[in-house]
Amino acid sequence: MNSERTRLAALYGGLLVMAGVLLLAIVYLLVSENVYAGIVTAVAPAVPAARLDAGTAAPALPTSEWAQTAVIEPGQYAVAQKVSTAAGDAALSQLLTVSGVSLAVYSALSVALAWWMAGRVLRPVGVITARARRLSGSNLHERIALKAPPGELKELADTFDGMLDRIQQLVAARQRFAANAAHELRTPLAVQRAAAEIGLADDPPPEKVAWIRDKLIDTADNSERLIEGLLLLAVSDEGLRRRERVALDETVTTVTDALAAEAKERDITVEVAARPVTVEGDAVLLGHLVHNLVANALRHNHPGGTVTVRVGPDGLEVANTGPRVDPAALPLLFEPFRRARARRHAPGEGAGLGLSIVASVARAHGGDVGARTNPGGGLTARVTLPTRLPAARAQ
């Protein structure tokens, strides 16, 4: 901080001193050119040309001034010239002395002013630095809130505050993720332990053993799906390790065909409108993205409802009918373990990772995801990906 202030003070002070030296040099040159002529005019305003020494020209004066001047004797003009030269030298010497003293005072004031100005300019930087040093996980809520006129430093402070907002949200999301993951992993373990204790308490009848076996298998399946979802989320958060050309419309068709049996079982109609579109990315991750969106639209629906899937150059859109969703809850749906409604632990209920995996895969492909509520109920999720229309397949 002090080094930057010293550099700025040296820069500002040097510029001011250079400007002062240049100004004094210009003044000296202008004065030196006219001081002798002015003094000669004052001492000996006019001398007839016939009485000048040989080779000396009379000053050019108007005729009216020639009539008013006194005539000096021969030789007096040379004396007047010497007196004028001595007076001019003395005047220039005095000018240099006064200018030098003035320049020294001006330089000292310039350096002091530059030091003060550099401190004022760098004060917001000191505030930002001090606040950054104090930041930790316990005081991420603090902000700089710099009170200053609009400018680059004000913009820097506001940008720093915005960065703190994003960091605070990220830290809070990670904390919620850890707490929810621990809860989701603890629940099946508790169920397994309770079932084992009940089944092994006495000599259980065969029907109880069968029930315990089914319960343990179902709990193990849920745990396996949860772990697979967490692993998939971690893989997509790392980004893409390889890229290939993926026909997004073909992926949508494959996924909807695979979910046709579930849609029929739930009495839901699936409508697909797919235009040929190619995406540069990972085919497996994109398949999970489409599957999670369509499966989420099927499971959060009502019998006789519909699911509409559209894919084109603008991206992928999945809309469904179903219960109304609170608009305030939309941004939270793409966080891990978040649901539109509280979990009921019903059969087939997911862990709440589907839409968070969709958001992570979209980010890994350089895209974005969003959602809006439908007027009649249900949700419309839209994924925007860097897509292009393949010319060979469009013909």
Image (cartoon, helix red, strand yellow):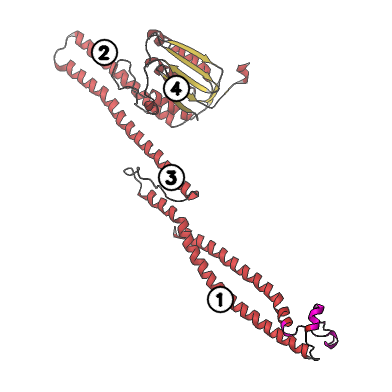
The quadrant holding residue 180 is top left
Identify the residue position indicated by label 1 in the image.
Answer: 101
Query: What whole-number distance in Å separates the C-alpha atoms at marks 2 and 3?
Result: 55 Å
Q: Is residue 65 above or below residue 172?
A: below
Q: CA distance from mark 4 to mark 2?
A: 35 Å
Q: Please provide percent x and percent y for residue 70.
A: 78, 87
Label 2 or label 3, whichever comes before in sequence order: 3
Q: CA distance from mark 4 to mark 3?
A: 32 Å
- Would residue 390 be found to the left or right of residue 56 on screen? left
50 magenta-colored: yes
Q: Are marks 2 and 1 in contact (CB under 8 Å)?
A: no
Indicate the position of residue 285 as horizontal and vertical percent values. Answer: 46, 24
Q: Nearer the viewer, residue 77 or 331?
A: 77
Q: Which label sits on residue 381?
A: 4
Point out the frontmost of discs 2 and 3: 3
Q: How would you classify the magenta stretch by its main secondary structure?
A: loop
Rendered image quadrant of residue 200: top left
Q: Which residue was labeled with disc 2?
A: 214
Mark 4 or mark 2: whose residue is earlier in sequence: 2
Marks 1 and 4, how far apart in space?
77 Å
Earlier-in-chain disc, 4 versus 3: 3
Q: Which numbered mark, 1 or 4, is in the foreground of this view?
A: 1
Which residue range is magenta in the image? Answer: 42-67
Q: Is residue 274 left or right of residue 373?
A: right
Q: Which residue is mark 3?
A: 160
Residue 255 shows up from this direction:
no
Q: Is residue 50 visible?
A: yes
The answer to whether the residues at label 3 and label 1 have Cβ atoms under 8 Å apart is no
Give the mark, 2 or 1, whose residue is nearer the N terminus: 1
